Amino acid sequence: MREAVRRWIDDRFPGARVNPLAEDASTRSFYRLTVAAGTSILMDYGAPFEGESEDQKLAAIFRRAGLPVADILEARPELGCLVLEDLGAKTLEDELQACNEQGETPQVLLDAAHLAGRIARDGSPVLSESARAAGPSLDSERFRFEMAFFLDNFVARHRKIRGEHGRLGSLLESLADAAARTPRPVMCHRDYHSRNILVRESGSLALVDIQDARWGPDTYDLASLIFDAYVDLADVWIEPLIAACLEAAGTDDDPLVRQRLHLVAAQRMIKALGTFGYQIEVAHNDRYMDAISRTLARLDRLLPLKEETLAIHAAFRSLDLFAANP
């Protein structure tokens, strides 16, 4: 912890017990502060910031939309930190560890799918009336950047495959363009997975890591949930999850929705591999090794299902990208 922040905590929360929380792919650091009156979460950006941070701006949008996020209890931009409501330590990932994959779709997972639909349905009107209405967005340009990031950080850095990648680069650019097409952009959490969904003591859900929320394809958060890199979901759970999300979003289920879901899921998982490669090779964070294996296995199953992604599957195989982690 930075010394200036430590001194402020000692002054503002005398006698507080400070426990660092697990690191993720963020550049921010998180700590649980415990005092006699209860607990709170300190978010440290690592440097001072001016005005409102993205977390503050997005939290206001989520709250206006009636979406469950932590209250911001105190902001200290001159120190570069926020103090947040403590929503608890149990994630959806934790909750799903005890679920029987052969049973019915867990209610908590259906609730998460419903919440994904609400982000699109209730968040989009609020986002459209906010200062962020004009962007940023998960568009073709952003998706192309993510595909290039995958080639640099997963293929080249992590798998040590240098030089030309055959047709893969052009195929991924085409995938980026196709995945970005949507009849109506909606507000997306952008990282809607089991580590960013908390299960409170009441059983209700709450969202964290919302600072990258933005416009995006109407199936993006659904794809993030059902192809979550951190948990194994039974095949029989998937259709109820799709139905719950689309119903909450007010979206009709039809072949075009399924086509968009397929393309977005492929792009999202390939993008995730780029992030995992960067975290392992550059940030030296091995927490994502299991996520790589799970994501590759899912891509190996998903890509051959539609003609539009068959060539990407073949290109992955030609580069031996589906092989076990080195």
Image (cartoon, grey):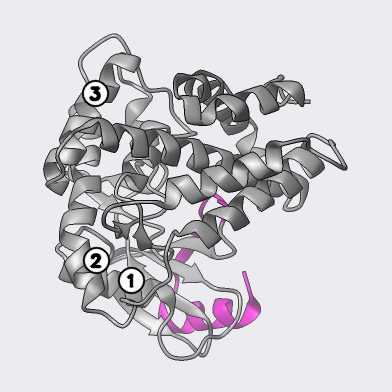
Up-down relation of residue 105 to residue 150 (above or below): above
**Residue at 35% over, 56% down:** 189
Q: Nearer the viewer, mark 1 or mark 3?
A: 3
Question: Element at badge 3?
Answer: helix
Residue 45 versus residue 280 in the image, above or below: below
Q: Dot 2 corresponds to which residue? A: 62
Which residue is located at x 22 percent, y 21 percent? 105
Confirm or deny contact between disc 1 and disc 2 (CB under 8 A): yes
- Mark 3 is surrounded, within 10 Å at the Cα level, by few (under 14), some (14 to 19) or many (20 or more) other residues, namely few
Does the magenta run of residues contain 9?
Answer: yes
- Tell me which amino acid carries mark 3: Glu
Residue 285 visible in the displayed image = no
- 218 or 236: which is nearer to us? 218
**Disc 1 from disc 3: Cα separation:** 30 Å
Label 1, on which residue? 58
Is residue 317 a member of the stretch shown in magenta? no
- Percent coordinates x, y for residue 61 in the rendering: 25, 72
- Element carrying mark 2: helix
Q: Which residues are magenta?
A: 1-25
Residue 105 lies left or right of residue 234; in this view the side is left
Classify residue 121 as left or right of residue 96. Answer: left
